């Protein structure tokens, strides 16, 4: 397989037995068989054709900030769009960002151009592709508010575009998450605004994050989705689970909605802790917490 992958991507973009703990913000996860970094839509399309022909399992990786990868790793191919497909283009009051562009860069580009509408996402440590896939959100805003259209590829390598209305955005979901479409890029429709005002909003969101979230420890952000009518963090805190740990995984003392890696957590520790929290919260409140974090690979 190495020769075929290298003929499409070049030697430097093909890694074998690559530890996924190096590519996830949780800093856990075993090796993937093939870690592949296309630089263009053409390369990605060629790659997908081979992967399909070989019947190889495929996982698309953004910035790895919403993932729990199993200790036994991932069989098949991880295609990482964050390393090389990350160009950003500002055109008038719109920005086209390739899927691998991280949100902090997109938000900085918007600030530099005096464009408002994406400030809420500046502190989300994901890529724009991952954010579209998840319809990421914070502080009463969601990515869908800024999306004009999304360019995507299906697993046979064909390219399509969808308007925002066609993206079927829901709470942490989209047409892409329902169909495993591969997001290539996204056009954001923003509004002209005063740069100082944009900067002040980013600073406000940043200080709220720094004061409430355990940003000094590896995690994947909020572990659970917000259950209707409740806050996951509140339910976990009221279940006296703040600080509860299994192995190296701990319910953050600072924000009960986050599970953190205190240094040497395995994916199994994190998974066991997720299940423990779900059990305790269900017994106490009758509410079933559903992970927001995506579980990937073999545990
Ligand atoms: C400290 C911290 C704070 C966070 N705060 C927030 C927050 O405020 N709001 C919020 O919504 N999330 C938050 N998150 C979670 C996470 O950053 C978001 O879910 C983000 O959108 C994930 O993007 P990613 O590029 O890291 O995706 P990944 O974690 O790499 O992948 C997530 C999912 O998206 C898919 N995916 C990624 N890129 C593509 C693509 N190009 N095409 C198709 N599928 C793709 C993957 O296959 C996977 O299923 C936080 C995480 C951390 C660690």
Image (tube, rainbow, N blue to C red):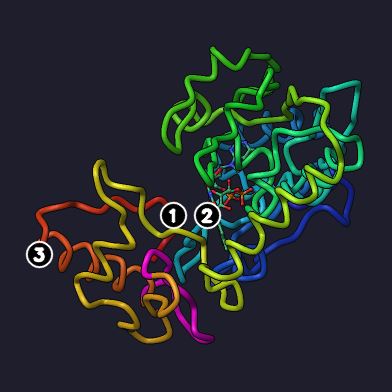
Residue at 68% across, 18% down: 149
173 vs 146, nearest the viewer: 146
Q: In the image, is residue 283 above or below residue 137?
A: below
Magenta span includes 129: no
In the picture of the structure, the residue carrying the numbered disc 2 is: 66
Give how far across and how far down residue 120 sits, in percent: 63, 44
**Magenta stretch?**
256-268
Q: State how far apart marks 2 and 3 are (Cα).
A: 27 Å
Give how far across and how far down residue 298 sits, in percent: 42, 61
In the picture of the structure, the residue carrying the numbered disc 1 is: 293
In the picture of the structure, the residue carrying the numbered disc 3 is: 284
Dot 1 or dot 3, earlier in sequence: 3
Q: Is residue 226 left or right of residue 180?
A: left
Dot 2 or dot 3, earlier in sequence: 2
Q: Is residue 2 visible?
A: yes
- Residue 272, labelled with which disc? none
Q: Dots 2 and 1: beta carbons under 8 Å?
A: yes
The answer as to whether callout 2 falls within 8 Å of ligand 1 is yes
Residue at 49% across, 84% down: 262
Q: State how far apart marks 1 and 3 are (Cα).
A: 23 Å
Q: Residues within 10 Å of mark 3 (few under 14, many from 20)?
A: few
Residue at 56% across, 70% down: 211
Residue at 29% across, 62% down: 234
Q: Is residue 29 visible?
A: no
> Which image quadrant for residue 130?
top right
Q: Secondary structure at mark 2?
A: loop
């Amino acid at each position: 397989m190495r020769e075929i992958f290298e003929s499409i991507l070049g030697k430097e973009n093909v890694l074998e037995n690559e530890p996924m703990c190096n590519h996830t913000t949780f800093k856990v996860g075993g090796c993937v068989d093939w870690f592949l970094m296309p630089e263009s839509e053409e390369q990605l399309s060629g790659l997908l054709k081979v992967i399909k022909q070989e019947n190889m399992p495929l996982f698309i990786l953004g910035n790895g900030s919403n993932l729990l990868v199993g200790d036994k790793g991932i069989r098949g191919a991880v295609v990482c769009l964050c390393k090389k497909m990350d160009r950003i283009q500002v055109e008038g009051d719109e920005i086209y960002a390739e899927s691998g562009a991280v949100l902090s860069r997109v938000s900085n580009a918007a600030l530099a151009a005096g464009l408002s509408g994406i400030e809420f996402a500046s502190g989300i440590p994901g890529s724009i592709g991952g954010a579209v896939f998840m319809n990421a959100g914070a502080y009463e805003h969601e990515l869908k508010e800024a999306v004009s259209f999304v360019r995507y590829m299906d697993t046979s390598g064909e390219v399509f575009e969808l308007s925002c209305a066609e993206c079927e955005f829901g709470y942490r979901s989209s047409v892409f998450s329902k169909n495993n479409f591969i997001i290539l890029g996204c056009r954001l429709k923003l509004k002209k605004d005063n740069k100082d005002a944009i900067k002040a909003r980013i600073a406000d969101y940043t200080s709220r994050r720094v004061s409430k979230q355990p940003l000094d420890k590896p995690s994947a952000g909020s572990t659970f989705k917000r259950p209707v009518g409740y806050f996951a963090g509140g339910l976990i805190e009221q279940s006296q689970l703040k600080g509860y740990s299994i192995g190296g995984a701990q319910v953050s003392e600072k924000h009960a909605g986050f599970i953190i890696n205190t240094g040497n957590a395995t994916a199994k520790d994190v998974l066991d802790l997720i299940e423990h929290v779900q059990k305790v919260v269900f017994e106490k409140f009758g509410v079933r917490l559903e992970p927001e974090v995506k579980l990937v690979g073999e545990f």
